[in-house]
Structure formats: structure tokens, C-alpha cells
Image (cartoon, rainbow, N blue to C red):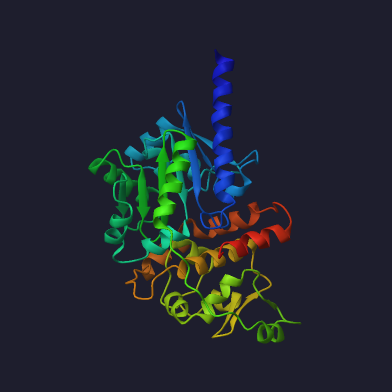
Amino acid sequence: MKAQSISMEQSELTALRELSARIGGNPLLAQASSGNTSIKVGDVLWIKASGKWLIQAEDDDFLVPVKLARANRRLEENTAIPETGMESPSRVRPSIETAMHAILPHKVVIHVHSVNTIAWAVREDAPRRLNARLSGLPWQWIPYALSGTSLARRIEHALKRFSQTSIFVLGNHGLVVCGSSCRSAEELLSEVEGRLAVEPRPAPEPDYALLNQAAPGSAWSIPECAGVHALATDDISRRIHSGGVLYPCQAIFLRGIGSGRGYAEEMLLMVSNHGVLASEHMTRAERETLVGLANVVQRIDASAPLRYLTASEVLDVVNGDGEAYRRNADINFHSKGSDAAQSKQLIGARE
């Protein structure tokens, strides 16, 4: 009986790893180390390790076990879940969203930074717009909250209103879908993605000749993904991204983009009407986040009323676990396949 139980657990963990890898391979759902997945097996919550990339699902340390009863008891006491703290003795910690995964009663939880969802979730009129698209599905709108306990509490309150909710659209953040199995959760994710899909706005082609003249022999290079150049060549996109920070990963990995100053100026040169040059020192995580930002902005309607993160919200993100999260993402990245294949995947995000 014990051997059968172990075999069942391994089967469920394998299914979660396979699901995570599929999500991680889709740049419209996950960029760099964004997003997290979990499954509850008995009294244990198995969740993605903080800073790991979903595409790394086969790594031995991809999943971290957390005692579910203890996690929920700590949340009831308004104290931190021990494994999630920086002082954790383990070299890997569970995702910062462990509290959210623990509070949700569903067996399988998927949290993604879907560019289609974010393009809706940064709008001030998002609840009304989403209601039309998600009609008939068990969904709820969650106003923006800082990742961790604050977000978990918002979702807990939503569940008290309607306990059957299995879809949560997170304001200025992303999407959470839940299911009784990996298969049912993935099918629901596909349904939501289909309903929220937005065709990216066409953008003028970059001036590669001019960009090539500026790049050779310098510390700058032309981004692999053609879609990134829309941030400079498309008037609407320039206006949107210059208005402020739209979501947390933008603040963490692309600090300053949207504010017109600071770290972003060290990473990017926006050549208006011509294209973008990126610093040779940009990490893979920063580059993938940049592609994600371009994909989001190109899906936002020109007339959309936008809700940017406030200055204090950006500071909360950056001064919280943001810096540690960024470092972990860089450390945890390792090549999966050839550079050519990765470039094709990134470019495909705009196709």
C-alpha cells in the first residue's frame, strides 16, 4: 500500500512538472522566472521553487514541499510561512506566492503572467470588460495586491464571496486558474486564454540600417525579438510604456522603464521611430521580460483607461523580495536548447 501511495505521488508530481514545462515554453504565458504552479498531495503542498523558471521543471530542485497544515496555521496566525523566509536554511525556497497556493482549496493551481490577461488587467475598466469575455465561467476580479500574504488575503476574501471560484484575474499582475487535476487546470487555462486573446497591434518596422550603424563596436546590440522595437516605432506603445510601471515584473527586471529615468536608461536606448538598442549586459531574464512588456503593450487598445502602479506600490515591490527574486532568476537560468531555438521562440511571441 505504501509503495502504491509513493507511486501515485510521483505520478502526480510528474504531471505537474510536464504541465509546468509546457507553460514555461510559451512566452505568452511565462517570461523568465515568472509564474508558479503547485499540487497538493496528501498533507503536502508541492510548489515551484522561488526564482526557478517553469521551463526548468525537470530539475531536481524545481519543486519544494511545504506542510500544508502548518502553512495554513501560520496564515491564520498572521505569521510568515517559515520556508518562504530569507532565513530558510534550504538553498531553495518555495515561491513567494506560497500563501496564495496554500489558501486555495483546489488540488492544482496555476499562476501565469499571461500577456493577454495583463493587457486587460492594467485597465481601469477591467472588471467590466472581463465580465463580458468570461461570462459563464467561475471567475473573480482581484484588485492589485503585493505578492505574498497580501495577495493571499485578497483571494481568501474572494472565496468567501463565492467558494466555487476557480479563475482569478489579478489586477496589474496576471492570472490564476485552478483544477482538480493538472489536465482540468490546463484545459481551463486554455479556455480563459482563448477568451482573453487580443491580436497585437501592427507596428512600423524598425530601421535596422540606422540601428546597425549605432550598435557596432559599442556596448549596445539589436534585440533578437522584432516585436521589442514596437516600444519605439509605434506611437501608441511609446505613450503607454512611458506612462509608468504597469505590473511588478516590469519594476523588478526593467527598473525605470516607464519612469523615463534611472536603471532603464542604462539598459535600453529607445530611438524614437527607429527601434531599440539593448545593453550587452542585459541578462536573459531582463531580455525575456522586455519581450513580455512589448507583447503586453501591443495588446492594449489606444483608448484604454490605464491603471499604472503607484510610486509606493513600485517601492513595495522593489524594496520587498524584488531584488532577491531578480538575482535568483538570473542565477537559476540555464540554457534549454540552442540560442537559435530560444530566439525563434521569442520572435514567435509576436506571430
In this orientation, does residue 52 appear? no
Q: Residue at x 43, y 32 (%)?
A: 68
Vertical relation: 30 (above or below) 80: below
In this orientation, does residue 231 appear? yes
Quadrant position of the N terminus in the picture? top right
Picture quadrant where residue 180 is located: top left
Q: Residue at x 59, y 16 (%)?
A: 3
Residue 227 is situated, as x and y percent measured from the top left of the image, at 57, 71
Which one is nearer the viewer's eye here, 295 or 33?
295
Q: Residue at x 38, y 37 (%)?
A: 74
Which one is nearer the viewer's eye here, 204 or 289?
204
Vertical relation: 266 (above or below) 75: below
Residue 106 is situated, as x and y percent measured from the top left of the image, at 39, 35
Which one is nearer the viewer's eye here, 208 or 175?
208
* Residue most extreme to the right: 217
Vertical relation: 112 (above or below) 208: above
Q: Residue at x 42, y 47 (%)?
A: 191
Locate residue 336 relative to residue 311 in the image: left or right: right
* Residue most extreme to the top: 1
Residue 9 is situated, as x and y percent measured from the top left of the image, at 54, 26
Vertical relation: 144 (above or below) 81: below
Quadrant position of the C terminus in the picture? bottom right
Residue 262 is situated, as x and y percent measured from the top left of the image, at 52, 77
Count the labels in the image: 0
Picture quadrant where residue 144 is located: bottom left
